[in-house]
Amino acid sequence: MSFLLRNYQVELILDIKKSMLAGHRKIMVQSPPRSGKTVCMAHIAKNATDKQKTVLFFSHRKEINEQVFETFSRAGVDMGLVYIGTVGSIVRKLGKLPLPTLILVDEAHHIKASQYQQILKYYHQAVQLFFTGTPIRLDGSGFDDMADDLVVGKSILWLQEHGNISEFDYYSINLLDQAKLRKRQGEYTNQSIDDSFDFKQQHGDYLSHYERLAKGKQAIVYCHSVEYAERVSKRFFEAGYQSAVVSGKTPKVERERAMRAFRDGEVTIMVNVNLFTEGIDLPGVDVCIMLRPTASLSLYLQFAMRALNPRDGKRAILIDHVGNHIRHGLPNDDRYWTLEGVDKTKSSSKEKEEAPKTCENCFATFYRDKIVDGKCPYCDEPLKIIKDIEQEATNETLTLINQGMEFVSIRGEMIEVTREEALVYKRVKRYGKKYERCESLAELKAFRIIHGYAPGWLWHKQKELNLWRN
């Protein structure tokens, strides 16, 4: 049986083939969580085994491998020509396995780890395809030393707009003292997360907000430690909800029993530690509750995307109690991927991407372009707007003067600008989303600010449109 690929999946596979035909043999493939990377890999593996070529697939989790085996089998891949294993198991079998023609790696943002590199260097003659939603490491570095090309799939926002993943409402009720968080090896330590929580206060808050926003809906809760997860599960159970706790240390039989009960609807609240992030399909989930802060964009998107399986009329509910959106933006933000990762000198400049706004009344979180007449787009309450005029990296600021000024609504906020600047903003607002209508650098800068795009967007479009003068 072969899967019917969606148009964007066909496009991704064709782009991979084009890269291979151009001579690239180590290709990073970026495609968001929930976009069907496993189905794409199955199609690629089937094409290879149909030509009697051997395929090696590996990842760092047994759960991912089990799902890949099932998907490959259903897609008609000749499993006699495929070896699937965990990273550790393959390292132990180096030299004993048939030489692969093609290597497929899922969750490939891990490939700089030593065991991954052992495998990839040993089988250097094979074509290597690295699939990930986030081709970036915790320290901001990329993979230009591991891959010779990057193929970028459709964005989360595009997938939403075309009905491939669910729309969502994002709520932020921060229960952490962010100043107490500390990192080790790029991620927040469990001890500092414990220190940051006001346990007495937040026990009531996460339950009350679930009941107000998503009462009775199936939810995945992400926690940082087993001890904390058990506390959370107990609190939900005492409130009358069937809940379960699973972690990477939960015995396989017990974990599978809990997952089956969750899929069958017998469990409403699944509290987990270090599970249900990568490559796990849970179609009935409507709610994600984040009680674990993370410095990892990859992990954050995995948290959020677990609840975004599409269904007619569905709007997922994402409840962020730890300020993850402050660090990473909203899940469907536009992101610009490169093999080089993040340029730290650029990211530390004074000009920063707009942060999402949170309504103090209903805790909905959104960008300013959603605001109409100064009111929350969710509860219609007037918003407290803080005037924050965005500063350009070139130190060209929006000039404030006492006389002859006009007001322009920029992403829901009234900003004072000179008459000349006001005319630019008013003209550019009529362009809608058609940035290609901009005829000067000043217009392109105004377009970026109006739409809340990241600073990197300006450079890319400036180059594309050849606009170098105001």
Image (cartoon, grey):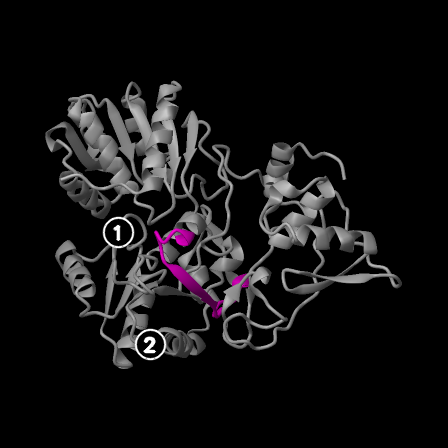
Amino acid under disc 1: Ile
Disc 1 crowd, CA 10 A, few/some/many (<14, 14-19, 20+): some
Residue 37 visible, this angle: yes
User: In the rendered view, does 396 fall on the left or right side of 314?
Assistant: right
**Viewer-nearest of labels 2 and 1?**
2
- Which residue carries the number 2 mark? 215
Q: In which quarter of the image is the C terminus?
A: top right
Q: Which residue lies furthest to the right in this view?
A: 403
SS class of the residue under badge 2? loop
User: In the rendered view, does 437 fall on the left or right side of 56?
Assistant: right
Residue occupying the point 32% across, 33% down? 13
Front residue of 387/59: it is 387
Tell me which corner region of the image, top left, top right, bottom left or bottom right, holds residue 405.
bottom right
Residue occupying the point 77% across, 47% down? 396
Amino acid under disc 2: Lys
Tell me which corner region of the image, top left, top right, bottom left or bottom right, holds residue 344.
top right
SS class of the residue under badge 1? loop
On screen, 275 above or below 109? below
Q: Residue 416 carries which label?
A: none
Q: Residue furthest left?
A: 80
Where does residue 457 sit, x and y in percent of width and height? 59, 42
